[in-house]
Image (cartoon, rainbow, N blue to C red):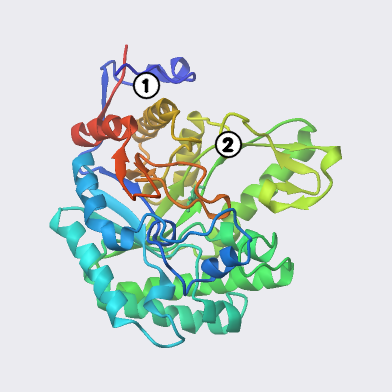
Amino acid sequence: MSFEKPEQFSELTANIARDNVLKFPKNFLWGAATSAYQVEGNNSNSDWWEWEKQGKADNESGIACDYWRLYKKDHDLLQELGASVFRSSIEWSRIEPEEGVFSAEAIRHYREIFEDLKKRNMKTQITLWWWTSPIWFQKKYGFHKHASVSIFCRYVKKITEELGNLIDIFTVFNEPMVPLGQGFLGGVFPPGYKNPLKFLRAVNNIAKIYKESYKIIHKIRPEAQVGITYLYNWYESEGFGFFIKLINKISQWFRIDLLGNKIKGSQDYIGVDYYRLGKIKFDWKNIRMDSRNQTYLGFTIEEDKDNPMKWITYPKGIYSVLKEASAKFKLPIYITENGRPTEAGLEDENRVKFIKDHLFFVHKAISEGVEIRGYNVWSLMDNLEWLYGYKPKFGLIEVDYKTLERKPRKSFYEYAKICKSNGLEIDE
Ligand code: BGC
């Protein structure tokens, strides 16, 4: 299918070889991502399950995509996609449903899942904490308590001993600043606090846990790659000149540097999750705190009404982010998530364009020397979008939540061509 060049194309063509296929580096990892809670179903020992039961999210997850039972079907599709990596996670509340009690059955099941991926010659990029904790942990402790450090590290050690030989790339935490902000300041994620002091304690503990986990994993599996992902969107300031620029800088520091600075020297790579342009503006009529709608005492983010998540699509932003992250951290980068939601799944054409436009700029960054080792679409399949339930559809594959049938969308086949050819075809 023909691919329209991104709007910002012309100003950048100068450095790109005049060839209509943009080739990616040898051994570049192509993949798609999901997370345990969002696809597995029936995670009833998880704090998010309780949160849903209390009516604090738009849908209860229920059986979700039933990946827990149907994983082989999804792996068949991953293989058909031509994926060389699969990014997913382990649900802590399945592994340790009661304090200090590890479930041999859950460990065995994850082993089967990872072995199945390995049999298909795929690399595994596995996250150990993707926003959900066991209910007992949240009730008795929480990341703001110092005890969380030894408790979480015990889980990390167990996973590395039991499953570490099947994990190529460890991601200890997925975008930790998101659930920390939403759970300790915004009050809209568990544990539901609006408490700056608890927030700061939790950030410090997460940093301690991360650094300790880095050592634990490397001690057991010296060859593993260990890191975290950052929600790394591109922010640009508008209006009120210096003041808005300052707010922008502070928000950037909050999202990336606050934790990033604390864990410097303990990361083998940087995981970049990029979705959109953030345009901060000030609105006198909105002087309130509403973190679900991203409104912080009058500061809000401009919205695109045509996007189910209201996110502004901005492909060039991924290029700016990649350049900035590589200069800041001086580490190899995995693009661990990039994707676009559609509402009924009908505007899948937009997803195709989104992926290709972004890959154009990823290639541009690579051609200028940024070490990018892989790219994952969010998401392999439609799944539970946290507070917003099942409405936003991010999948290359449509999931019928009644029959659990999987139907690859056109974007699946378009992305498959890219994965299999290790290249992006463009029209001159
Ligand atoms: C998260 C996913 C989420 C996606 C879309 C990412 O920031 O890691 O869990 O579904 O964004 O909102």
The residue identified by callout 1 is 15
Give, as a three-letter code, the residue at label 2. Answer: Trp
Decide if residue 220 is on the left or right side of residue 58: left
Which residue occupies 42% across, 52% down?
271
380 and 182: which is toward the camera: 380
Asked if 107 appears above or below 346 in the picture, the reply is below
Quadrant where the image shows the C terminus:
top left
Q: Which mark is residue 311?
A: 2
User: Which sits in the foreground, 232 or 132?
Assistant: 132
Please indicate whether residue 191 sits to the left or right of residue 415 in the image: right
The part of the image, by quadrant, that contains residue 82 is: top left
Quarter where residue 408 is shown: top left
The answer to which quarter of the image holds residue 217 is bottom left
In the picture, the disc for residue 283 is none
Q: Give coordinates of residue 226: x percent, y percent.
A: 36, 63
Please rate how many residues cluster around mark 1, counting C-alpha atoms within 10 Å: few if below 14, some from 14 to 19, many from 20.
Answer: few
**Amino acid type at image mark 1:** Asn
Vertical relation: 341 (above or below) 125 = above
- Give coordinates of residue 101: x percent, y percent: 39, 87
Q: Is residue 390 left or right of residue 159?
A: right
What x and y, as percent, mark residue 180? 60, 63
Does any atom of ligand 1 lie closer than 8 Å to the CB of label 2? no
Q: Is residue 219 visible?
A: no
Residue 411 appears in the picture as rendered: yes
Number of numbered discs overlaid on the protein picture:
2
Q: Pointer 2: residues within 10 angstroms few (<14), some, or many (20+)?
A: some
Question: Mark 1 and 2 residues: CB-CB less than 8 Å, in contact?
Answer: no
For marks 1 and 2, the one nearer the N-term is 1
The N terminus, quarter of image: top left
- Residue under the point 36% across and 84% down: 102
Q: Please, is residue 68 above or below residue 391 in the view?
A: below
Secondary structure at badge 2 equals loop
